[in-house]
Amino acid sequence: MSPTHRGSCPHRTMGLCRLFRPTTCLSQKKIMHFFRIEKQIDQTEKSQLSQEETRKHRRRSCSLTVKKRRRKLLPMVPSEDPEQRLAQMGTLASALTALGIKYSDDLTYVPGMAPRSANRSKFEKGGMQVLSKEDLETLEVCRAMYRRGECPPLVVVFDPLEGYTVEADGPIKDLTFIAEYTGDVDYLKNRENDDCDSIMTLLLSEDPSKTLVICPDKYGNISRFMSGINNHNRFAKKKQNCKCVRYSVNGECRVLLVATRDIAKGERLYYDYNGYEHEYPTHHFF
C-alpha cells in the first residue's frame, strides 16, 4: 500500500524550507561526523565489495504490483568518485542542518510518543504486504553502504520556487531502492494540529487511536526533501519517477522509496504524496 503525506502546509517544500536556504559549506571531517560514517576501508577493496554486492542483488525490471510477476529491488549504485559522493552528502548535510534536523536512517522512538511496541504490521487495516527475504537482503546491503559513506547518486538542491528538492547526480535504474522514510514515530492523534509539513502515514489501523505517522521534523534523511506531484494536474503524473510503499519488515511497518523507471542524471525525483487516502493538498504544486 502507498503511504500518504499528512500536513497543513499547501506545498510541502515551501514555508520553512524557503526561509532556510542552505549556505553552509561543510568540511570533509564535518560531513563524515554528521553521517557517522564508519572507518573507511581501502578504496580498491571497497569498490570491489560494492561491485560484488551490486552484481549479487541486481535484477531485471518489471512491475511493482505485488499481484503481478514480482520484481526484485535493486541496490543503489553509488558514484565511483569518492569526492563526488562527499559533495553529494554535503548537500544533504547542509539542508538538514539549515532546518535543524539531525540525520537518521532509522525510525526513532521517543519517550512521550508512540512506543516501538505500537509499530506492528498486524494492526494494519486490510493487512500489509511483507518484504521478501531477498528484498530484505538488498535493503540491508544498502544500509551497510550508507554506513560506509556510499550513498545513492543524489543531491539536495534549493529551488527558489519549490524549496528543497532532490536531483539525480547520476543514472538510477528502475526498481532501485532510494531511501527509507525516517523520523520520529508518533500517534496520528497527537499530530492532528501539527505544523510539520512532511508527516507520513506509517500504520493505518482499524482503530484510529492506533494509527501511526512518521514525523521528520527532528530526525530524517534525504527522503524528507523529495518532491510530490500535483494530483490535480493530469500532466504532472508524467513527472513521477518514484513510489512510496509500506512493507512489513520483521513484523514492523516500514516505508520505502523506490524508483519506478530509469532516472537520468539531472532529473528531479517525484512521487505521489497521496497514495490512496488523498488527504494531502497538492493543488499548489508545480
Image (cartoon, grey):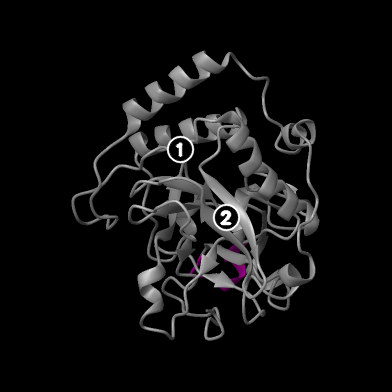
Q: Residues within 10 Å of mark 1 (few under 14, many from 20)?
A: many
- Image x and y of residue 70, in percent: 24, 48
Along the polypeptide, which appears first: circle 2 or circle 1? 1
On screen, residue 57 versus residue 88, left or right, reads left
Q: Is residue 108 visible?
A: no
Magenta segment range? 204-213
Front residue of 192/286: it is 286
Amino acid type, label 2:
Ser
In percent of width and height, residue 62 lies at: 23, 50
How far separated are the C-alphas under marks 2 and 1?
15 Å
The verdict on residue 279 being magenta is: no
Rendering quarter of residue 49: top left
Residue under label 1: 139
Classify residue 5 as left or right of residue 221. Answer: left
- In the displayed structure image, the side of residue 82 where residue 114 appears, left or right: right
What's the residue at 22%, 57% (across, down)? 67
- Please name whichever residue, 263 or 279, is drawn nearer the observer in this view of the structure: 263
Q: Is residue 23 above or below residue 19?
A: above
Check residue 233 in the rendering and tell me which mark sits there, or answer none. Answer: none
Q: Residue at x 54, y 35 (%)?
A: 143
Q: Which mark is residue 223?
A: 2
Magenta stretch: includes residue 207: yes
Disc 2, SS: helix
Where residue 256 appears, x then y in whole percent? Answer: 47, 51
| Secondary structure of the residue carrying numbered label 1 | helix
On the rendered image, what quadrant is the N terminus found in? bottom left
Q: Position of residue 58 (x, y in %)?
A: 32, 34
Residue at 76 percent across and 58 percent down: it is 22
Could you say which is closer to the camera, residue 81 or residue 203? 81
